[in-house]
């Protein structure tokens, strides 16, 4: 393979385009240094509890939480939350819209000895179907954004669902970058290493009063619930601005800083408009070239935070992403298990339009010189 040196003036300022972990900015690192005296101190004392409380408050404001919704957090990332949900939220049976790897993992977590087999609606990678009401289902689950394929889904209650059925959305790569109405969902959960530009390891769940009631209702039954997966313990700790066990303080500080910055943009709606513009640049570029095609056919299903573009079979996508990597533009590889001749680019809130424009210039250069 020929070595390609992309001219300096075509390179983005920051070459990190991964869909999580995602780029951490210098203002976040400054915030970390400024608050370094918190590191190595007890998470049961006021300074760290105040930090947790500030993040909960900022998330509440950013997502415009209605009265009664709570910001709950715990350790283990979104993957842990799937098991939390299966043990602490699903009563008898869940239903899932599954259109990629992450949605499928959520289904797997709900395939347990104590629940009926989940109802699952699947579709070909790059597409999605729709959830309709199923009698007897008490928890409906779907991703807001399927990171493995770059397909997004609306956040709206499933019409005709049984009274009391909960709507639960995996927002790990969507949260902060896609606009929606929180009253349409009972559990909106995510981890902070995507739009919030922090490190992984924590989960956050915005929970409606109905979801909180469900967790306490299940905890009062004789179901065995390990402490680590107990949502009621997480709720009770979160009400005291704490977590069941020790959280990563660096993660919290990086997240606080990014949240402050996202609030300074004007909040969720302007932040989501940024992601729409940034992803639009890439989709428009793909439409302008005969050898690049958006993987997702239906424009209304195309993600505004994770862009997937197929390359013509005459071009080796691995050669493209390797050439980019050799020039400091990293993590444009497609989701590993998808196995397509593709590039994938995160257009999170923290990715400036200028960097997306430079990435496109770099891609043009690589495609020309490969
Ligand atoms: C990244 C991601 C996850 C996994 O998050 P972890 O914090 O690594 O467990 C789950 N769901 C979606 C949609 C994701 O993008």
Image (cartoon, rainbow, N blue to C red):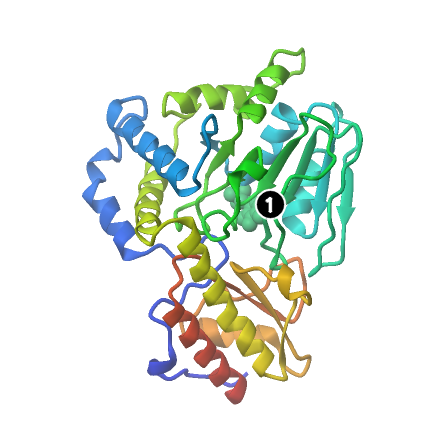
| Residue 113 position in % (x across, y down) | 76, 25
Residue at 31% across, 41% down: 253
Would you say 121 lies left or right of 311 here?
A: right
Q: In this view of the protein, which residue sits in the foreground, 197 or 314?
A: 197
Answer with the quarter of the image where residue 133 lies.
top right
The residue sitting at 59% across, 29% down in the picture is 84
Mark 1 surroundings within 10 Å by alpha-carbon count, few (fewer than 14), some (14 through 19), many (20 or more): many
Q: Position of residue 129 (x, y in %)?
A: 74, 52
Q: Identify the image quadrant of residue 247.
A: top left
The answer to whether 86 is drawn above or below residue 300 in the figure is above
Secondary structure at badge 1 equals loop
Counting from the top left corner in percent of width and height, residue 4 is at 46, 84
Whether residue 147 sits left or right of residue 125 in the image: it is: left
Q: How many numbered marks are there?
A: 1
Residue identified by numbered label 1: 155
Q: Against 221, is 231 above or below?
A: below
Pick the front one: 237 or 67: 67
In-image side of 217 versus 95 (left or right): left
| Observer-nearest of 195 and 16 | 195
Q: Residue furthest bottom?
A: 369
From the top left corner, tell me how far across and down residue 346 is, in percent.
49, 61
In the rendered image, the vertical position of residue 267 relative to residue 119, given as above or below: below
Q: Is mark 1 within 8 Å of ligand 1?
A: no
Image quadrant holding the C terminus, namely bottom right
Residue 320 visible from this viewpoint: yes
Q: Quadrant of residue 336?
A: bottom right
> Could one spot residue 370 in this view of the protein?
no
Q: Quadrant of the N terminus?
A: bottom right
Residue at 74% x, 24% y is 92
């Amino acid at each position: 393979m020929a070595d390609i040196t992309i001219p300096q003036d075509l390179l983005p300022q920051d070459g990190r385009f991964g869909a999580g972990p995602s780029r951490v900015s210098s203002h976040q690192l400054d915030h970390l240094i400024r608050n370094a005296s918190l590191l190595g101190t007890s998470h049961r004392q006021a300074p760290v509890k105040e930090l947790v409380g500030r993040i909960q408050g900022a998330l509440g404001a950013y997502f415009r939480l209605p009265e009664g919704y709570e910001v709950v957090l715990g350790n283990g990332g979104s993957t842990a939350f799937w098991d939390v949900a299966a043990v602490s939220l699903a009563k008898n049976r869940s239903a899932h819209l599954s259109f990629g790897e992450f949605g499928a993992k959520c289904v797997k977590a709900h395939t347990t000895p104590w629940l009926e087999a989940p109802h699952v609606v699947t579709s070909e990678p790059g597409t999605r179907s729709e959830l309709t009401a199923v009698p007897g289902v008490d928890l409906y689950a779907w991703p807001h954004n399927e990171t493995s394929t770059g397909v997004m889904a609306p956040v709206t209650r499933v019409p005709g669902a049984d009274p009391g059925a909960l709507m639960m959305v995996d927002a790990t790569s969507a949260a902060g970058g896609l606009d929606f109405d929180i009253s349409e969902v009972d559990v909106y959960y995510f981890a902070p290493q995507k739009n919030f530009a922090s490190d992984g390891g924590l989960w956050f769940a915005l929970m409606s009063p109905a979801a909180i009631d469900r967790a306490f209702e299940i905890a009062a039954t004789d179901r065995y619930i390990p402490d680590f997966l107990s949502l009621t313990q997480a709720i009770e700790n979160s009400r005291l601005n704490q977590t069941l066990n020790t959280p990563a303080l660096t993660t919290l500080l990086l997240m606080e800083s990014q949240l402050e910055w996202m609030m300074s943009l004007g909040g969720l709606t302007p932040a989501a408009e940024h992601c729409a513009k940034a992803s639009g640049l890439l989709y428009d570029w793909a439409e302008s070239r005969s050898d690049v095609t958006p993987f997702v056919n239906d424009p209304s299903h195309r993600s505004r935070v994770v862009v997937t573009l197929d390359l013509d079979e005459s071009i080796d996508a691995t050669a493209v992403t390797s050439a980019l990597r050799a020039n400091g533009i990293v993590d444009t590889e497609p989701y590993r298990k998808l196995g397509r001749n593709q590039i994938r680019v995160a257009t999170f809130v923290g990715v400036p339009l200028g960097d997306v424009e430079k990435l496109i210039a770099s891609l043009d250069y690589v495609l020309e010189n490969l």
